[in-house]
Image (spheres, helix red, strand yellow):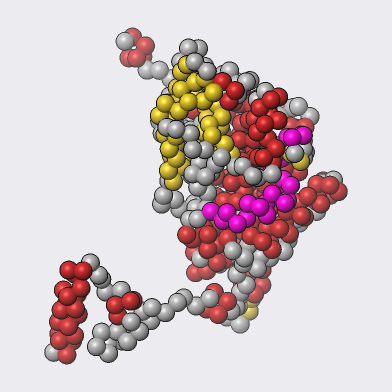
Amino acid sequence: MEIDRSFQRIAQLAQQLQPVGRSLSDETLGSRGIEGMPTLGVGLPALEIEKAFPQATPATSFPPSVSDFYQLDDLLTGEERATRDRVRAFMESEVAPIIAKYWERAEFPFELIPKFAKLNVSGGTIKGYGCPGMSILSSALVNAEIARVDASCSTFLMVHTCLGMLTIGMLASEEQKQRLLPPLARLDHVSCWGLTEPGYGSDASSLNTTAKKVEGGWLLNGQKRWIGNATFADILVIFARNTQTNQINGFIVKKGAKGLKATKIENKIGLRIVQNGDIVLSDVFVPDEDRLANINSFQDTNKVLAVSRVMVAWQPIGIAMGVYDVCHRYLKERKQFGAPLAALQINQEKLVRMLGHVQAMYLMGWRLCKLYDAGKMTPGHASLAKAWNTKVAREVCALGRELLGGNGILGDFNVAKAFCDLEPIYTYEGTYEVNALVTGREVTGIASIKPPVSSRNKRS
């Protein structure tokens, strides 16, 4: 009977609150509950992870790098190691302590942009115009080291540098380079890269966004989807089909342009910090001076993708390195049955399997960069590295998730975040399947990406 009376009191209170749009919230109940009923912790903040689970160190204090089992550092020059170490120290000290909270809220850490600017890595391989002019391996190492701590930050910088800036650096006029690249290199401006559309992802060359020539410039109409940095980019590199030539051209669209709308894609489970957006272009006017001078077909766009695919092949390397480092420390700190988890044979086998994958991925990435430098890299080389590295990194993350047990689903220990962040990377810059078919075309001489036209369609 006492329970029945309690439920009646709750129902009466709820009915009283409904007219004013209120609910049974912490504010309503307070810490004492309803008429003295216990609240079972309502309104209490969560314990800090260090207090809730003192037996292992969270990723806010990122572990040292311990994955270089075969001493692959010997493959790097002194300058490449120095660049790598500088970025690693920055990510561990400035990013690791704060990034999990931003990931949980799906917010971008704008406070980090000036700090990234001081690293002097924006612009990557571009020479001059305030850019660092790094080797492709140095740029790849930067990408991996950022991804080791946070893949979203890596994606932000990769979109800005290896897509937006590189398109300008490779395919713009000299006047456009001098005007656009310096503020992008300083990160005073941020860029995004608009190729993918709602109806055209893997089949990007069939894009529908149009560019119509008018007096003094061009009118752009269409939609773009999944565009990283779209919601806050100052410079939008947009690809559209020239209505006169039917070829793909490139354009610079400025933030705030009339007819431009960019909205955030919500509810992502991976790369939550990256502000992917839907872009709508409604009669957006682009002056002639902002049409990118040397993009006249999709083949020109592919020149940029060849470099960016090298960079994205290094993202899973960095992610896997970070997961291994966290698991290595965790297994030595966490104890069960009176011994560290590292003392169990099955855990050692999983850890060693992860280590083997990390070393193999690194070697493939290193060789890919050397092929690029020698002018020998083919699309199939880059595609195989991207496809295979992301596939193997998925296993590394899955094993790491197993090794951490319940903590493997918490962002506090990095592995769960890395596990989720790898999923969009597995898909973007060419899905696993499309990249496999690009390589398959090279090794067999037979193209199979586009499905064959059926005999019925041929007759019609």
Q: Is residue 161 left or right of residue 416?
A: right
Residue shown at 62% from the left, 55% from the top: 112
- In the image, is residue 109 above or below residue 34? above
In the rendered image, which quarter is residue 43 located in? bottom left
Q: Position of residue 365 (x, y in %)?
A: 70, 42
- In the image, is residue 284 above or below residue 319? above
Residue shown at 67% from the left, 31% from the top: 179
Query: Nearest the camera: 148 or 443?
Result: 148
Q: Is residue 173 left or right of residue 152?
A: right
- Is residue 188 visible in the rendered image? The answer is yes
Residue shown at 56% from the left, 20% from the top: 288
Query: Nearest the camera: 449 or 8?
Result: 8
Q: Position of residue 153 (x, y in %)?
A: 60, 51
Q: Is residue 26 left or right of residue 428?
A: left
Q: Is residue 365 left or right of residue 39?
A: right
Q: Position of residue 69 (x, y in %)?
A: 76, 56
Query: Nearest the camera: 334 or 11?
Result: 11
Query: Nearest the camera: 127 or 380?
Result: 127
In the displayed orientation, state which residue is furthest to the top. Answer: 459
In the displayed orientation, state which residue is furthest to the front. Answer: 216
Residue shown at 19% from the left, 78% from the top: 13
- Count the marks: 0
Quarter containing the N terminus: bottom left
Quarter containing the C terminus: top left
In the rendered image, which quarter is residue 38 located in? bottom left
Q: Is residue 137 magenta?
A: no
Question: What range of the chain is rendered magenta?
Answer: 108-129
Q: Is residue 126 magenta?
A: yes
- Is residue 326 visible in the rendered image? The answer is no
Q: Position of residue 431 (x, y in %)?
A: 52, 37
